[in-house]
Image (spheres, rainbow, N blue to C red):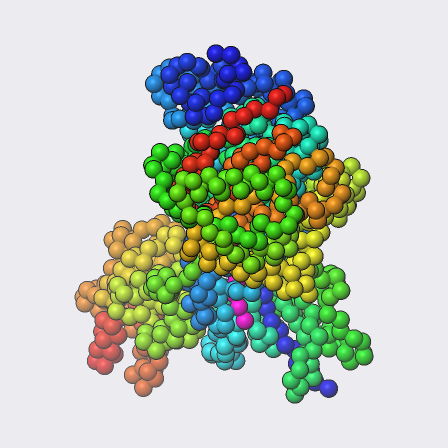
Amino acid sequence: MSNATIISKTAVELSHSLSEKELSSQEVAQAYLEQIDRVDPQVHAFLHRDDDDFLAQANASDKRRAEGNTLGPLDGIPVAIKDVISVQGQPLTAASKILENYISPYDATVIRKLKDAGAVIGGRLNLDEFAMGSSTENSAYGPTRNPWDFNRVPGGSSGGSSAAVAAREAPLTLGSDTGGSIRQPASLCGVVGVKPTYGMVSRYGLAAFASSLDQIGPFSQTVEDAALLLETISGHDPLDSTSFPTEVPQYSAALRDPLTPCTLGLPKEFFGEGIDDEVRKAIDQTIEFYRSLGHKIVEISLPTTDLAVPVYYVIATAEASSNLARYDGIRYTSRSEQSENAINVYAKSRGEGFGEEVKRRCILGAYGLSSGYYDAYYLKAQKTRTLIREDFSRVFKEVDVILTPTAPTPAFKFGEKSNDPISMYLSDIFTISTNLAGLPALSVPCGFTNSGLPIGMQLIGQAFEESSLLSIAHAYDREHRFGCQSPNI
Amino acid sequence: MKFEAVIGLEVHVQLDTKSKMFTRVPCGFGKPPNSLTDAVVLGLPGALPVMNREAIDKSIKVGLLLGCKIAPVCKWDRKNYFYPDMPKNYQITQFDQPICEGGEVEIELPGDSPAVMGEHRMVKLTRIHLEEDVGKLTHYENDSLVDYNRAGSPLLEIVSEPDMYSPEETFSFLTSLRNSLIYAGISSCDMEKGQLRCDANISVRPVGTKTLGTKVELKNLNTISGVKNGVEYEIKRQIKAIEEKEEIVQETRRWNPDQRYTTPMRSKEMAHDYRYFPDPDLMPVKIDQAWIDGIAKQVPEKPFDKQRRYMSELNLPYSITAALCPDFSLCQYFELVASLTKDPKKVGNWVVNDLLRELSNANSETNPIPVEESPVTPQHLAELVDLIDQGVISNNVAKELFPEMFSSGKSASELVQEKGLEVKSDQGEIESICARAIENDPDAAQKFRDGKEGAINALKGFVMKETRGQANPKVVDTMLRNLLSN
């Protein structure tokens, strides 16, 4: 089988080929390494690779298979990891200078689960520093390029994770989503990305940006693949107090069940001004498709929608200002050579080690928590967050899922928004409210612009209803499979 | 003008739990530096805290012991500040919803003499909250070293109302609080190991006025006497300052125990803005009545309640109870012996006088042997008391025997048998010795016959000396009187 054929396969197809012995995990790993060698100098999705380790894992998988001890459908399948999730013995930079020399001494829970499932853990993927951004331009190690147009951003913050799947450098990747950081890059790169319900996937081992919003989730070519990866990494973790004690449904199996007619809600606040015409058209077509399957489409209202961005930027930055305090130049983070006393170690190491956006958010967040401002900012934002949650609860009495565009526009050009933080923040306008409400949501590719840029639709589900969310998405995806189209690189 | 001091204390107590407050690493003291650490303690990227239930159990127990209101929800906050003793640069603590509110500590002030019970009074508590301890910094000329073994250990902060008015009261408060916490198995409260630490808020005001003066926070009070001495100094310093028309500034001062004075550390203007907010990594935990009821069953009798019971039910004198009751283990020992014998009062005397003496004489280095390790077991002491009671040995013999029991670990009956120390009640032998006594001291015999009752003691002494104390005193008494009346 040619390398081109191997890397074009979905994870489910690869898994099938492995079990049919048409392929070895070693061959799969080699094919991806060659593709990375070929395209990554331009895409720059990877910050770090450990090819020996990667091939050794593939080898171990082949050995298991030969002995009849295969660990499951993901055994032997490569999964590349956003460089913000701990893998024992591998670097974790969070795309920041301050973590330049840090090697993680332990596995995140999601990594332990993947290793238990036999997955071959691949390289470290680029992102906006500490997952703060929507374009991957904030990486201290240079931006990732969108495989569909190298002049454009892949989205962010998990831009490396979405670009790697789109460029066929990995069949599956993990990212993290705090305000849209999985769904928006998935949309901009034309792949599937899922943000699970808050508490469904353990955060243990994920370098925190905003603890009450962060969730780890999968990227893939298809919804089917995403379901497979998600069911592997989900589940209660005693090491994460915010992890929810619930059984994990078998999402992949559920996809094979016939879909009963359901109601899709279109929030009118998400369909106002500012949406690109081609995005609008593609979304209209998906709506028509669902209607044609016999599902009911209703207009709904989420009046708190325009509060989401300001609330998010108070809460997320407040939590970040505290979460990032540990990167201080004292122990494992880079220490400024200019520092001659304790206060200086902090000020100079952080001043030199953090990028502009991280500094901006830490200062913003600390301000909102300061004595005298707490009530007006942080407390008020938390109260408003409750209103946003209630808004969704009310709507979910009438509908099963909510359908919206994932992002208002297709991939934008480098530099287009990087000097205008507010305009950059607004590219997450459709994704942020679900993080605030803790709901599961995903982005599925739903077409291309005339110039060939991918477009994504977002489906938002009820808490812990990933199963029906994935099923409804799969109903569209299995007929269209836009994520299986490869860019010409 | 006369002044009075108003004092409030903030007491930090390290809980005796198997593992740290938010991770599975064990708590411990004296281990190699930075050996009791993991990703959570070191604040590595991605590490998350998980609450230690045992620490909550123990905090509820303290709350019940001190009569506090237990919060219905245990909630966690972050206190943000940069300092190398805390790798995350925030401390997980309880800001606006402490686990316990209110409550009080009963204190006893010194009586007129050690044999007289002093006045008792309740000192009100404001709150008790739980937090994680920080690491330990050691400063050298050019470098500072940090040991995170202590970091993340569960630490209880007990805050009193400004409800103490003298250094003696602070001493009594800490002693009483410490005894209660040891009783309840909360903490070993070893101040040398930093398991109990204390800061004091001190102000002075003219006697008769109600408003509080400007307060000064005093730190580095490392022993209970250190608290008393530091507070005493600071009160004098403040009174002198006021008398010399100086203004008291709100500040934190440090007690220097060797030179015995306080020096400024930081003023109010330098106070931190800790930017408290609820820790998003930890879910609030509901504390329901069933949980509280379960803990309530484990709350022990309080030291002063025990003391009152010993005095009223067991008729122990105050001086004996005052020596017994501060020490929970000693009380356990005492109660076991008392339950095996008929006379608790005698047992009390043996424990407080003889056992305590032997325990502290047989010290290893500087510390007395703990009562749990006493070579004289409760059963041994009970047997000794019984042997006296049954007249097998005299009290004097028993007193001599006790140190030997302690050093050899043998029981009283074993030693009595080995040495042939049973009381001699053989009438014939005692009669002949009594006769010799009268012969030997005709003066005393005559004096007794002339009506001087006390003169008989000299004769008894002779008999006891001759029999090495083994003669039954009752038999000797009867025999001498018989012989002298003839």
Whole-percent x, y for residue B413 in the image? 26, 55
Q: Is residue A437 magenta?
A: no
Q: Is residue B127 magenta?
A: yes
Whole-percent x, y for residue A94 in the image? 63, 36
**Please, what is the dominant secondary structure of the magenta stretch?**
strand
B205, A121: nearer the viewer:
A121
- Is residue B423 positioned above or below A133 on the image? below
| Quarter-of-image position of residue A261 | top left
Residue located 67% across and 53% down the image: A365
B313, A340: nearer the viewer:
A340
A307, A117: nearer the viewer:
A307
- Is residue A38 positioned above or below A193 on the image? above
Residue A229 appearing in the image: no
Residue located 61% across and 38% down the image: A278
Whole-percent x, y for residue B362 in the image? 45, 53
Picture mark count: 0
Magenta segment range? B126-130
Whether residue B474 sits left or right of residue B243 in the image: it is left
Residue located 34% across and 58% down the image: B401
Q: Which quadrant is the N terminus of chain B positioned in? A: bottom right
Residue A9 appearing in the image: yes
Whether residue B13 sits left or right of residue A363 in the image: it is left
| Quarter-of-image position of residue B439 | bottom left
Whole-percent x, y for residue B152 in the image? 54, 49
B474, A126: nearer the viewer:
A126
Residue located 52% across and 30% down the image: A482
Q: Which quadrant is the C terminus of chain B positioned in? A: bottom left
| Quarter-of-image position of residue B445 | bottom left
